[in-house]
Image: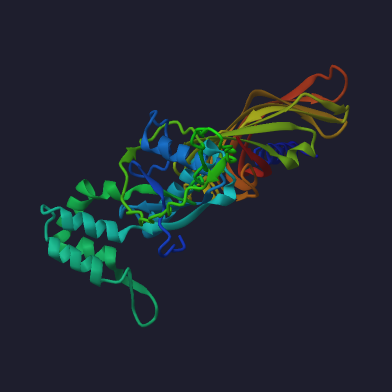
Amino acid sequence: MDKGKLLTSLVLSLAISAFAFPIYGQDYPCDSVTVHYDLNSSEICNYPPQSDLELFINAVKDAYADGRLREVGISGSSCLVGSSVYCAATALKRAEDLRDFIIKNAGIPSGLVKITHTGIDWSLLATLVENDPKVPERESILKAITDTPIWISDPNGKVVGGRKKSLMDIDDGHPFAYMREHLFHSMRYARAYLYAEDKAEEAPAPVIVEPEPVIEKPDTIVTAPDTVVVEKTDTIVKTVVDTVFAEPDTVMIVSGPAKKEMTWEGSKVWLKTNIPYWAVVVANLGIEFRLADHWSLDIPVMYSPYTVARDYIFRILAAQPSVRYWLKPDMKGHFFGIHATGGMFNISVNDTQRFQDVDGVWGGGIDYGYALKFSKHWGMEFNIGVGYLWTRYETFYNIDNGASYETGTYNYLGITRLGISMIYKL
């Protein structure tokens, strides 16, 4: 085997390692809470004692402990900043995060908490515009909200406009800019509704009437009567008053370290291992950090100190850090990345030659991949990358204490990452 083919085999081996709301009608909630968020945020930070969110969770706990809890409904909303797909995903993410937060902190089964509605709260926007006399072209804005369909399509079914576009076209976008600055923050929320049975009223205790004392008269024998138990017969009238649906005070939530149940979408760190590399007796472990929505840093490391046989030596230490951009903010599906490569090697695949690096192996490239979610914590990733690698190496006779007889350099352009990795999200 010539040196070029052998070094190509090394490069490919290194590449493998890196692959290291239904509507309730007249059934009104007995309590509710609204959580507001910053733009693009869905995280719930520490909330202060006796805040509305804490009081709501305590009410859920009490209802569950008393056997009165029927359901907690969750709705999520987003403003109009960003694409329609992104706004819908953000609203859903806020609802999911609030759901997980309530389940963890109230200690109730997940089946009792349901997401009932997510999306753009157009009714709220209309109310905000109507209540703010400073909105430019206010009547035109209200008419667009109430009269324009969310989507407008041509005869072929292609979307050519809609409600959001109509709002943005009014007065060259000045009203839309005003709403974005002054109103849209109120649309970025998630809201929870508590549905529970009323507490049962205790039956009145019976009233025991003691007998009047008996005054004996001469020559008259009077027998004291037995104790008489008289039940209170007042009619108990229970008046049912419909609960007035009122929005509670809101809890302002800002971005920061989340204190919530970790799920796939909410995880900040995940571990992975590249399955194919174990087949060539190379241990490997990767760690990936969520940097921001859509962005992550992946760092796989491979290490093999073993001499399997005299004619098969595969000792490597390498890493391939990669910065990735995910098309979805929940870190699943498609992603693209830029990676770097650095490592050392000492390998032989026959009984005549052994190759060892002099200055290491270095390079970089671009990669593409796809991640599948299996459960809350487990998943799998597939990725492939192409790029450039450079190394300077020595060639030794493959015998005990074999001498070096040649030094060379090698440049490689091709596949530099390839793998199938199991993922565990912390």
Percent x, y of residue 128: 21, 54
Percent x, y of residue 324: 50, 41
The mark tally for this picture is 0
Nearer to us in this view, 408 or 137: 137
Locate the C terminus by quadrant. top right
Lateral position of residue 203 relative to residue 313, left or right? left
Nearer to us in this view, 354 or 215: 215
Residue extending furthest toward the bottom: 155
Would you say residue 50 is visible in this rendering? yes
Compared to 45, does 197 lie above or below? below
Nearer to us in this view, 183 or 223: 223
Residue extending furthest toward the top: 401
Locate the N terminus by quadrant. top right
Please report the residue visible at 69 percent of the width from the left and 39 percent of the height from the top: 274
Lateral position of residue 43 relative to residue 130, left or right? right
Compared to 324, does 87 lie above or below? below
Percent x, y of residue 337: 51, 43
Lateral position of residue 184 relative to residue 73, left or right? left
